[in-house]
Amino acid sequence: MRTAAAVLTLLGSLLLGAARQRAIGQRLACLSCLAADLSRMEAELAGKNASLPAIAAMLAEEGEARSFFSRLSAGASSLGERSFRALWCEAAEAELPALEASEREALCALGAALGRYPLDMQLSALSRCRKTLEEHLLQARGSLPEDTRLSWGLSAAGGLLLLILLL
């Protein structure tokens, strides 16, 4: 009985390592997709091709961040009652949990500028946010091997420690 409990404990700790790896992968995919989507948004705004709600609806159709843009697009009907910044930040908090706090703060700062300031300032804010997300993506990709070893190493070591304690 103790052996079965020990094996299950070891497997559970390894599953925690796998979950951590999955979270790292989701963050990388989310950062990559958001950077691409902000680039598309910047191009659409620069070309004056569409409004912000229309761009959000367009971006809601594809990519890792489509749930963010879907929520933003759905909230566009309440734009008179609520500010675009509030809708943007609410969507970022609810739909982008894989991002770190500093990355969500950069997105919220962008939401404060969109639709509120002149076009050149909006484009500048988009560019700044996109570059910040791309920098975070490069850092995350650079630390991926270390993070992978750390996740698996800690989960295996924790599981082995529990295994020793139980046996």
Image (spheres, helix red, strand yellow):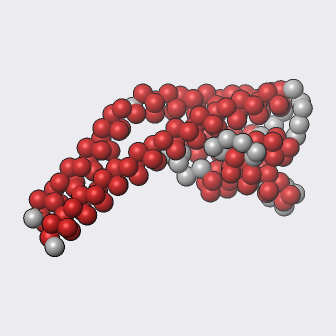
At x 20%, y 49%, the residue is: 157
Report x, y in % for residue 113.
74, 39
Rendering quarter of residue 21: top left
Report x, y in % for residue 10.
24, 58
Residue lying furthest bottom: 1
At x 65%, y 45%, the residue is: 65
Marker count (numbered): 0
In the picture provided, is 63 more to the left or to the right than 135? right
Rendering quarter of residue 63: top right
Residue 103 versus residue 143: which sits nearer the camera? Answer: 143
Residue 12 versus residue 149: which sits nearer the camera? Answer: 12
Q: Is residue 155 visible?
A: yes
Report x, y in % for residue 150.
30, 41
Q: Is residue 109 visible?
A: no
Locate the C terminus by quadrant: bottom left
Report x, y in % for residue 50.
89, 37
Locate the N terminus by quadrant: bottom left
At x 62%, y 57%, the residue is: 94
Residue 81 versus residue 18: which sits nearer the camera? Answer: 18
Image position of 7 with respect to 92: above or below: below
At x 59%, y 34%, the residue is: 32
